Image (tube, helix red, strand yellow):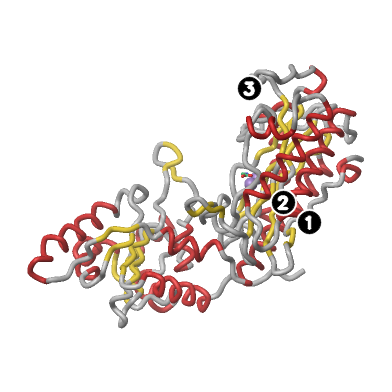
Amino acid sequence: MASPPPIDAAAYAERRGRFLHRLGGVAAVIPASSLATHHADVEHAFRQNSDFWYLTGFDEPGAVALFLPHCPEHPFVLFVEPRDPTAEVWNGFRWGCEGAVERFGADRAHPIAELPQRLADYLKGAEGIAFRVGRHPAVEPLVLQAWAHQLDRAPRTGSAALGLVAPCPMLHELRLRKSPEELERLREAARISAEAHELARRVTRPGLLERQVQAVIEQHFLERGARGAAYGSIVAGGDNACVLHYTANAAELRDGDLLLIDAGCSLGDYYNGDITRTFPVGGRFSAEQRTLYELVLAAQEAAVAVVRPEATAEQVHDTAVRVLVEGLLELGLLRGSADSVIEQGAYRHLYMHRTGHWLGLDVHDVGAYRLGEHPVALEPGMVLTVEPGLYVSDRLPVPEGQPAIEERWKGIGIRIEDDVAVTEQGHEVLTAAALKAPAAMER
Ligand code: GLY
Ligand code: MN
Ligand code: MN
């Protein structure tokens, strides 16, 4: 199947238009990511800030974008690292100021070194400044200085950007609702991620190291043209699956254990997949493993079925919890009435996380889940994960009044996670190519 094309320049321009409209008279300062130290003087692979990327498609560090609705002649200004043959020999190509204008649609571009002397001028006349404090230590003092400068001059000029506001509500509301082109990119990320899970199940054998399975998954991401893993792949055999953020992936896989794999790719333009599958290392579930697997699957399918316009992520979670709790009561792993167990949270030693999150340019994507008292209603174009699980181990104390866990259940960790887009009619499971029926998990 041909891959959908990356988002084009016109789409970024359209996003900027909508963001500028929402800003009203407020100017926004949106910095790019900086390179992060891995160790000593070695850096991690560059990962662009998703807000900056969403508005520019510009994939270099050391840049700052200004959005200036009060300057209709030049509402989009980019500050970038200038062309520099010596620096480019070491660190690679830069688009420079010329590229920023010609290729990325900036109305004006300047070397980043000029930001300190130019920022205050550009912000002059804005009604406020939208900037996320606490995240951009190199840019923050410059924004605060420019703001202070305006406040100092206000008595004489009669105008000043008096308010410093967060850009998040305006920008993240846009990012929460995916365009048809973005949905295509998420489908592509989901497709590659699903293929990797299918491959992983086929190669898994007792005696392999968890990271040898990780290698198969991540090789597939790269072979299919993705940037790599969207987050640290979790390849967790047996009891390791009960550690939610397990990424050591160093243990040997044992016959009789389950293997939980939570992995997804990140495309060149940062759209992500996020899938979890769990299956028996040796190809056959034990009775206890199958029982709990079927319960998690029932919870996951019931929760996915809730996804439609007007429902809420909270209802998706509550549905999964109710199915899990009722099943655990039947199995004797919980005691009491479903209502009282849920109300007291007396299931949380077995299921301790939420059932999902928004998915997009960030794996845990931006966007509010609640506005004040009210859970946000799902709308077509929103994409969320649905990922209930059960984790039976001794790590957490059994709540008072709940039964001790019999040994036969321990060391079973199961999660099943799909990426689900809200559609006019209900939903589309983007990750359906990764099988999850119990029979398909066996061989
Ligand atoms: N892999 C992170 C998550 O599932 O949320
Ligand atoms: Mn995941
Ligand atoms: Mn997830």
Q: Which residue is mark 2?
A: 418
Give the Cα distance between marks 3 and 1.
33 Å
Query: Residue 19: which quarter of the image?
Result: bottom left
Quick one: label 2 or label 3, which is nearer the N terminus? 3
- Answer left or right for 282 relative to 218: right
Secondary structure under tag 2 reads strand
**Is label 2 or label 3 in front?**
3
Sequence-wise first label, 1 or 2 = 2
Residue 129: x and y, percent?
A: 29, 63
What residue did someone put label 3 on?
A: 396
Occupied quadrant, residue 308: bottom right
Q: Determine the residue positioned at 63% across, 52% down.
A: 313
Answer with mark 3 or mark 1, whichever residue precedes in sequence.
Answer: 3
36 displayed left or right of 346: left
Q: How many angstroms separate mark 1 from mark 2 (CA)? A: 8 Å
The reply to whether discs 1 and 2 touch (Cβ–Cβ < 8 Å) is yes
